[in-house]
Amino acid sequence: MTDGPTTALMQKAYARWAPIYDVVYDKLTAPTARAAVEACVACGPRILEVGVGTGLALGYYPKTAEVYGIDLSEAMLRRAKAKVEKKGLSHVKSLQVMDATRLGFPDEMFDAVTAQFIITLVPEPEAALSEFARVLKPGGEIVLANHFGQPSGPIAAFEELASPLVKAIGWSSAFKAERVEAWARTTGRMEVVELRPLFPFGFFKLMRLRKRA
């Protein structure tokens, strides 16, 4: 399914956003990012962060973690690498340019895979989720932190009206949590174990999907 932006367009957009990304998103997303990191760390030390961006969440991991980060944008990763060096984040083992739908890692390498604020922007989200599941150890979790549109009701109607503004800042109310749940059912191995509303006022949600042993 390719109803989202193309990879090339995403790379250009992130190159433009890189210089101001931290200023715009840091305070807004920090509580949700911290919740995602906490959920990942509970699964084990080796963690893949997909769409690591400028590395806003990298400082939230404990020193005992082994964090691997990937992103489509070289401009974003340059800023993430600068943070790692400046702050001495020795738990960050690798930062690489990589497509979420074609991960260059072996099967069952990670205890947890997290994607924060990006799954609704990936051109082929189901393909990306399948790659997350492939590199995930049995018993591990995919941890998604994102804005998912409400399926129905007055909030859904409001989101429809506000969709141009939401899209402009990088999120999509058209993408519902049910789409991820439907993908999980097709795998036969992944199950949703949590869908929790977070700051601000439930706009962001934390979704955890566990890989059955």
Image: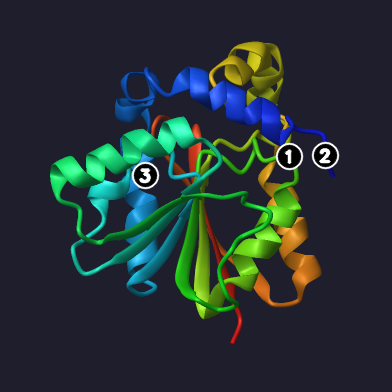
Label 3 secondary element = helix
Answer with mark 3 or mark 1, whichever residue precedes in sequence: 3
* Vertical placement of residue 155 versus 30, above or below: above
3D distance between C-alphas at marks 3 and 2: 27 Å
* Vertical placement of residue 163 versus 106, above or below: above
Query: Could you say which disc has been placed on residue 33 in the image?
Result: 3
Q: Give the residue type at disc 3.
A: Ala
Q: Position of residue 154 (x, y in %)?
A: 67, 23
Label 2 secondary element = loop
Q: Which residue is mark 2?
A: 2
**Number of on-image labels:** 3
**In this rendering, would 71 be left or right of 63?**
right
Query: Could you say which disc has been placed on residue 123 in the image?
Result: 1
Q: Position of residue 186 (x, y in %)?
A: 81, 67
Residue pictured at 44% horizontal, 30% vertical: 75
Q: Give the residue type at disc 2.
A: Thr
3D distance between C-alphas at marks 1 and 2: 5 Å
| Pointer 3 local density, CA inside 10 Å: few below 14, some 14–19, many at least 20 | many
Answer with mark 1 or mark 2, whichever residue precedes in sequence: 2
Q: Give the residue type at disc 1.
A: Pro
Residue pictured at 73% horizontal, 39% vertical: 123
| On-image quarter of the C terminus | bottom right
| Residue 3 visible to an observer of this rendering | yes
